[in-house]
Image (tube, rainbow, N blue to C red):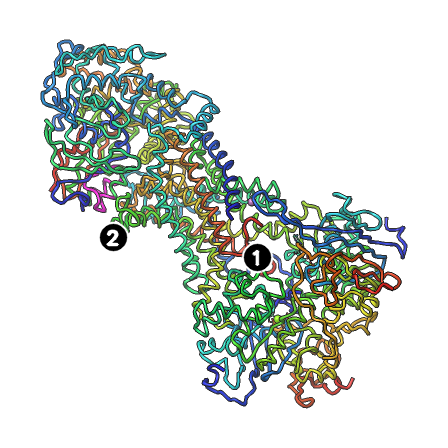
Amino acid sequence: MGRYALHRLLMAVPVLLGTTFIIYLAVYALPGDPIQALAGPNRMLSPSVEQALRERFHLDDPLIVRYGLYLQGLLTGDLGTSFSGRPVSEVIGGSWPVTFQLGVTAWLFMAVLGVLLGTVAGLRRGKAADAVVLGGTTVIMGVPFFVVAYVAQIVVGVDLGWLPVSGTEAGWPLAYILPGLVLALYSLPQVARLTRTSILDNLGADHVDTATAKGLTRRVIVLRHILRNSLIPVVSLLGVSLGYLLSGTVLIEGIFNLPGLGYQIFTAIPQHDGPVVVGVGTLLVLVFLLVNLLVDLLYGILDPRIRLGLG
Amino acid sequence: MSSLESLPGYDGSAPLLSVSDLHVRFGRAEVVNGVEYAVDGGRTLAVLGESGSGKSVTARAIMGLVRPPRGTVTAGSVRLRGVDLLTLPEEARRRLRATTIAMIFQDALSALNPVLSVGYQIAELFRAHRGLSRKEAGRRAVEVLDLVRIPAAARRARDYPHQFSGGMRQRVGIGLAIALNPQVIIADEPTTALDVTVQAQILRLLGEIQREHGTALVLITHDMGVVADVADEVAVMYAGRVVERGGAAEVYAGPAHPYTKALLGAIPRPELRGRRLAVIPGAPPDLAGPGGGCRFLPRCGYGVEACAHEPPAIEVGPGRLAACHEWKRVAAQ
Amino acid sequence: GGSGGSTPQAEKSFSVGVTTYFLSHFTPGKSVASNIDYALFTPLTSVDTKTGKAVNAVAESIESTDNVTWTIRLKPGWTFHNGEAVTAQSFADSWNATAYGPNAFTNNFMFTAIKGYADLNPAGGKPSKKELSGVEVVDPATLKVTLTKPLSLLPYVLAQTAFAPMPKAAFTDLDGFDRKPIGNGPYKIEGDGLAAGVTKVVLRRFDQYKGQPGNAVTIEAKSYQDEAAAYRDLQAGSLDVALVTGNNLTDAAARFKDRLVQVPYPAVVYLGFPLWDERFADIKVRQAFAQAVDRETIVKSLLRGFGHPATGLAGASVPGGGDPDCATCSYDPAKAKALLAEAGGWKGPLKLWTYQDPLNTVILEAVGNQLRANLDIEAVTTQAQPVDQLYPNMTAKKIDGPVLLYMGAGYPHLYALADQLFTKGSGANVTGYDSPEFASLMDKAASASQDEALGLTKQAARTALDGLPLTPLFQPVGGLAYSAKVSEVKPEFLGGVVLAAVKVG
Amino acid sequence: MTDTVNDTEMVLEVRDLVRHFPIRAGVLRRTVGVLKAVDGVSLDLRKGETLGIVGESGCGKSTLARLLTAHDRPTSGEVTVLGRSMHELRGGELRRARRHVQLIFQDPYTSLDPRMTVADTVREPYDVNPDLAPRGDRGRMVRELLDAVGLNPDHGDRYPHQLSGGQRQRVGIARALALRPEVLVCDEPVSALDVSVQAQIVNLLERLRETFSLAYVFIAHDLSVVRHLADRVAVMYLGKVVEIGTEAEVYESAAHPYTEALLSAAPVPDPALRGTRQEIVLEGEPPSPVDPPAGCSFHPRCRKAVAGCSASAPGLDPVGGGGHLVACHLADRS
Amino acid sequence: MASSTLVSASASVEPRRGLWRELLRRPAFVVSSAVALVICAMAAAPGLFAGWFGAGDPRRCDLVNSGLPPAPGHPFGFDVQGCDLYANVVYGARSSVLIALLVTAGMMVIAVVLGGLAGYFGGWADALISRVMDVFFGFPSLVGMIVILQTASAHNELTVSAVLILFGWPALARVMRGSVLAVAGSEYVAAARGVGSGTTRILLRHVLPNSFGPVAVLTGLNVGGVIASESALTFLGVGLQTPAISWGVQLNTAQQYFLSSPHLLIFPSIFLTVTVLSFVLLGDALRDAFDPRLR
Ligand SMILES: Nc1ncnc2c1ncn2[C@@H]1O[C@H](COP(=O)(O)OP(=O)(O)OP(=O)(O)O)[C@@H](O)[C@H]1O
Ligand SMILES: Nc1ncnc2c1ncn2[C@@H]1O[C@H](COP(=O)(O)OP(=O)(O)OP(=O)(O)O)[C@@H](O)[C@H]1O
Ligand SMILES: [Mg+2]
Ligand SMILES: [Mg+2]
Ligand code: NI
């Protein structure tokens, strides 16, 4: 397993390098003037300052030179400097705890709620509960989630006053419940539906009949012989969903005023703040790859039929 | 041995397992249509019949595995020493499973949970029915694996089903069934998926267990050779009914139902080499179609007018029943 | 409500919501003149919120005979938060740092009027000097400033935080200073300042402050990504004061009633014409467009009353503003149609531009609808571009239709707006307007006394508006809503709450 | 090209056929071992002849069948069909050569495309080999084929799920017959079917053999079925042929202990004979083809094994006269 | 050897029905396709529907009515520009449905082609395609969309669709790859190869039809997500912009006015939800109808 993990990590290196280049290229290709972006709509910059900034951030150099300089810095552990003048490492250092907590919360919601709903729907197939879950998840899929976010803020945060509306001040978990929940809604329908299908598959499986014939109680059968087996495909979906989830932080962190990575990258784009976009973007990809490696390892533990490294 | 005695209807002199007039319905199809058979301790009843004739469904109905929405038992009774399982509350029935009546499934790989170790799956029985601790149950599971001749049982107990060969899996399946010494074991085609040498091992193992514990064995198969080898009695099923019952030797020697006769004729035997095998023309009936009349009629060479009425089970000899109006003619030829 | 949770009960404290933009830099040369900046720094002058006049703050006196050479004397006893005395050198150091091109301080452009600026910002190559020749430290309490041309409004200019002083300590670690400045204002920064990932800054009252001291002992400034987010926290009770904008004003008016202070911004939202586009070369076309927009309805219906239909360049809150300077700012669809017909009618599609901003797009669409309805122009489309695309496009004259823009006055005077919008070469003069008549009037105003300057500026603005490179639409109005915990919530000139004035309890 | 073949000609020759599956592991996916699924098999088959292949599960029967029909490429050795070496062919040539050897699959449930009707399935060979039948004739030819395998023309419109197992197997046979092959390789074609249906298929195969003078390679583990159909029988154990001979030679005078065990383990469908049979129950599990025992691979389970059995692997040598070959040190080679 | 308990040996078989008749027999299909049809008709010819309550022109606006609730003749009320909301919602179907269909079709084509190639050929094609999918999965797609759309000169239905396709296909392709992998290894594919079928034929006749089911269902489910994403892009300032009329734009504007004019949010949402539901049901029904086993 260790060797397998190592192998996967090695494979991640070209993917990550490719990612940095693609992002760098994309930011480079963005139309518009970064200096103008820095100055804002109502503010003017003197030509000398403009010139100084261009020099400082190598804005006039060709792409390859800039990327080369970036990689050179990367080798010495320097992630570059944001246009705001802060080192990117500091920007990331300050924001990742927020995204981490948000991601974990959302992931938990997605996993727990998704599996719960899917299980209920699967076990009560064709009954009202099933219809409610199926219908509900369909509606969730269709409603843009900034709409859900605003409505949730106003209803739960403002009108009911149950949870903080925004910000991180209340700390984990309080501050992260509402944004985490909204973020989880993004992938929740898929998780719930996959769980449901998986439960249905397993309900009819022969080994469940064996378990019944063994005289086990319904509870044991459901938990140990149906749910556990059904979760195997769900686990890999949960890994992939992390990608959507990290992507969603771009929106959610903005709406809920969370100073996380998603927000940093979101504000950095219009600023053409290449170093920040590349740094944060690559970090997000790295996290995704790592988590999916973990998920795959977990998969091997959950499903003994899949022996990693041999298959 | 367990709680059977205390249940309503218990009658020590009744047959260990008796099924009567069992009806099972899947949607529109009356898949099991009045099955009757019985078996006593220490005896082996072979249930024969072609694919789809309802052998497995009957077995599953006995075990209580036929439940809506996947089919309903519409009528009949399944009695263990007189106790009707079908009217028993679910909890009481659950307690009887594996302790008094157990089942071996056809496809051992899919019948075992792929994500739990085999030791765990056997140990579960001891934990659920005997209330043993996880550790103690694990120890007993190893004993069971030993009993079914799994080499290095203690080590293999930690392995998962896919790590076993087909024969060993089936032995694990048998281990699951015999772990709690049930009085009745229903084996649903336990060797169909295996090749002959392994089949011989398995059948021998089952025979030993049966002799040792006086267990009643219901062996479902469509292998006429296996039946000839191990069965005391046979029940031949066709389209959801038992069309012929009796001692194995007698039935083989003089089948009284045209279907049984045709079945025996279809077996390739060395002496038939170079000749065409006897076949049963046509296809099995549609169980969802309208009933009434003998269901074998369209494929039967003995059809008479009376066959438009469903033939009752007629006693054709000592302990032998056949559901055919023309049994005399069939037996004579 | 209230946010005093983290501070002891006894201490008077409140929380205020600001946008993250306000919490990006604290160095005077990079500051954005937010209310936080004003809490941390006190420049030489300040603008009286009631009269709109520049009054002395750190300065004892600011005098000039020719509006070119100014002598500034400082009040004694002012110190920075670290105890260092505020001297003429503190100002000179700060100004030199900002004016020095290679430092790339964003406020650099504000120093163009000071003599020696060109030496510090040569067109190419490294500057030969590091100090403005126009700034002389006569003695610790006296500063002599020489300008390149007369500017009677210098006291107004000096009220911006860009002209605040910096202590010696700042120059040992400019980056550190930017995050945790040592200012001379009524409040000092507590804790780490703008450390990575912080979303709030705590200000503590500076007890040695020589000006009007603040009321609250501590102020929590929480950063929000936009005003709407801050407003929701205010609604939920976890914030005491917040700026309310846009559509939330309606809700705030109903919800907070008299705890909503209306804040007229010293700004104008206008429709600029691309003078380089020949379709707009005829002034009649521009007049037709200007009169086809129903400013009253836009303000009343779309903005729910939060705005003032423009009658001139600036609203009444700006010295020199509030007069009906704009002849074509009245809604007259019939006349508009007639004017357009006179000019030969409109052919082809019309595209309206603005920069990306939720409110802007809505307003632009309304303007588009009115132009379509009132001028019978069928194909009206709108496009919102990011700021960094729109402005370069305008400079490159690639915009092919009227642009909806916002312009705020840098300091409280009509002169500021007129100068930014109409002076040739100004960064904000996006229409390409160039009028010698306007220029000479402005020059006169700059060299005249402050009282005369007002009249001359008005005259210049009227001249420019008659030429119609742009037509003002309305002066925006924002709001300050606050919890019951605080009182004395007053807007400062740029619209933020005067932090020092807020009373707790 | 088949015109020159006369009745006694070899249609299929197999020489030293080997198929090893590499077992890969680790970071670099290096091959850490080989699974010897087929390990040196030589066979031949004449026109009209039926060769039965028996052996326990996993001994390589299906792998052999796939090699014979060019569904897989051998590691070494060669398969010659009508004088042409199959694995040297590529692309279109291979496709044309394939016509002569067709495979009938074990599982009638998975070997038919669930979305194609019976007629479409049987017609497909003609559609991809347009030279075999002009477009206009195809419908008729499909009907004839269906008729030949005992299906009604109206079965043609059905989908596989609407057919019984026996009927599906017939569709598979009709599909294989469409190309008029010389050889039909039947990989356990009746194992999934029950006795009454099995008899139908066995009869059908016999009848087809007569009408089309087909040669069969008939794989099964049911000895009685093989016996019924085969002229010659090969017994496989762990990738090797351990005994081969005519039906009578193998069944009546088995010379390999494994064949003996196999024959004795097969139940006889006659209760009267119960207990009279000398059943040799093989103990232990079949060894792994990854790591077969040294010497004779059967020796660990062989009740006759002597010391020499583990030392060297016996060759496949004649016993008695004729073509009866056995790979056993202890065989009586008189 | 293995024998299934589900042997269907039924003798009487219903005649092969036409696909169309088969579809019409399913209530789920009839209802969902009727709704989808109405929505598509609305998208194609909004003029026919918009005028039902008198105010047919979505661009005839009186700012005085800005944000007013439903009134006689204006059953949905007015939008912020004072235009009839009903007419706007009807016209909004055009862009939204167009984008939904374009994206769905585009994603499906790419997913089927790439997923199919990766699953069927394996080897380096699979490795390459899978790595590319990895990057797309891991990369925050919203960030990518923002960057690309900012680069694009125009933000119309085409560019928005293109971007949604670009970041949407991997999920589908992954599913496609999985099911192709299963089908490619099946015996009936081996059998087809055995009778001499070429790769193209095998892919088109056997692999594609048999592996398409899961993709079809997922696609149906995706339609809602697409419309929602379109709206999210508008929200982020890179999607369609006013005065383009689309449900996404409407929802985005409505969200800012949620407190004072909730009806702006409610009515487009209802249309959106109905559309989404109908497409989901349609996807399911089509999958079932195309599968002869489920007829
Ligand atoms: N879950 C089910 N739903 C619907 N029909 C079923 C189900 N299980 C079995 N059947 C039908 O019931 C009939 C009898 O099936 P059963 O499994 O008992 O046959 P069998 O005699 O065991 O055959 P085999 O030898 O193939 O195991 C068959 O026609 C089958 O199609
Ligand atoms: N593609 C493959 N890759 C690796 N190993 C394989 C492959 N195909 C078959 N094997 C292995 O080769 C051996 C022979 O398999 P094969 O399927 O030929 O046996 P068989 O005699 O047909 O068995 P059965 O009677 O169960 O069908 C087995 O151990 C099997 O696991
Ligand atoms: Mg069965
Ligand atoms: Mg095989
Ligand atoms: Ni690998």
**Any atom of ligand 1 within 8 Å of the CB at mark 2?**
no
Judging by the rendered image, the residue that carries numbered circle 1 is E289
**Mark 1 — on which chain does it sit?**
E
Residue D189: in magenta span: no
What residue is drawn where x is 88% and y is 52%?
D5
Name the residue carrying label 2.
A160
Residue at x 52%, y 69% (from the top left corner): B70
Amino acid at the residue labelled 2:
Leu
Q: Are marks 2 and 1 on the same chain?
A: no
Disc 2 vs disc 1: Cβ atoms closer than 8 Å?
no
In-front residue for pair A3/D182: A3
Q: Quadrant of ligand 1?
A: bottom right
Q: Report x, y in % for residue C475.
A: 23, 29
Gap in angstroms between the C-alphas marked 2 and 1: 47 Å
Q: Is residue E289 above or below residue D27?
A: below
Quadrant where the N terminus of chain E lies?
bottom right
- Determine if residue B145 is in view: yes
Dot 2 falls on which chain? A
Mark number displayed over residue E70: none
Left or right: residue A270 compared with residue D271: left
Range of magenta residues: C233-252
Q: Is residue A15 above or below residue D147?
A: above
